Amino acid sequence: MKGEIIPSEPDHLARARSDPYQAAMLTWLQGEADGTRRASGAHLGTFLNATEKHPGEIEPLDVARWKEHLKRRGLADATVALRLSAISSYYGYLVKQGLHDRNPVAAVGRDDLDVNPYERARKLPLAAFRRILQAIPDDTEMGARDRALLLFYVMCARRRAEVVGLRAHDLRIDAGKVTYRARLKGGARKWKELHPPVWEAIRQYLDLAGRDPTGDDPIFTATTNAGQYLREYYGTPQPEGPTPLTGEAVAHALNRHAADAGLDPEAVTLHSLRHLGAELYHEASGDLRETQAFLDHQRSDTTEIYLKQLTGEDHHHWQAMANALGVGV
């Protein structure tokens, strides 16, 4: 547009133009969720700093030494595997772009890592969630917002970033039916039904907040301007429009409401709400395929492992075994 001034290029972008490996770091995770970008970028950066090598100089031995270093530190196998996966993802991207001839992580064995992606999966007990809901005042803007958020996490069983990042254009109403746009792993999107109790809770929150979000406006916003001090200190401009709520803020709110309900806040996580939603849905449907679609798992065996990790595998013949041994009731 005439009269518009194109901002000058940041220093890190200017440097990246002279180094394709650095440039690849900026484009490698585009399209992924913010949390994924931050975590994977941090793991790669820590690895490269430890080796004190340029990315183009990394050999399989460097990866193997890093893996053993992580294990000696006592990190869980799943954590070690996750960090190696981040490095592998970067080099896999380099190979696809023709910038590197091989992925050095592929040559490093990982069979010694006992990895169950749902090893730490824990659901929030239903009774505990009911206590949390009862502890939230629904006649205040903050209380109504938190109630709507927590209901969304359980009844739709979505991940943290999906719900907190919801925008007005991610909701639509057609013939009275409300749907929302879900963001899946890998960047895919799909429209899913937003159940009436969740929609009513969102409407109550927006009414109390006096908001009617449109377009790119966030649905869930902060009630306090926590970043004002930092903006004044660094002289940065005020954000345009309402400030979206962060995942960390939602996690803190959940911990606060759990404490108000007399529960241990450290034992309650946002992901445990997804686990509760998964179990409730499967109990209601009794169908593994339906539950798979509800959770948007690509494979049914993933859903089966997920559910077994939450409930534990039943021992159907313990009584007969106990009778044979002459023990038990």
Image: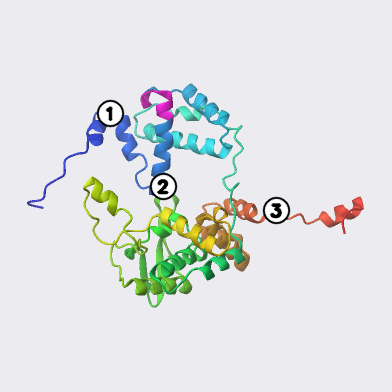
Queried whether the magenta region covers residue 119, the answer comes back as no
Residue for point 41% across, 56% down? 249
Give left or right: position of 120 versus 325: left
* Residue type beneath disc 2: Gly
Say whether residue 167 is visible: yes
* Residue type beneath disc 3: Glu
Give how far across and how far down residue 168 sits, in percent: 33, 65
Q: Which residue is mark 1?
A: 19
Residue for point 21% across, 52% down? 237
Pointer 2 or 3: first along the chain: 2
What is the quadrant of residue 291 in the picture? bottom right
Q: Are marks 2 and 3 in contact (CB under 8 Å)?
A: no
Say whether residue 183 is visible: no
Q: Which residue is mark 3?
A: 313
- The tally of labels here is 3
Element under disc 2: helix
Q: Which residue is mark 2?
A: 35
Give how far across and how far down residue 210 sits, in percent: 31, 73
Q: How is the image coloured?
A: rainbow
* Residue type beneath disc 1: Asp
Q: Which residues are magenta?
A: 47-56
Element under disc 3: loop
Q: Residue 231 versus residue 85: which sits nearer the camera? A: 231
Q: Residues within 10 Å of mark 2 (few under 14, many from 20)?
A: few
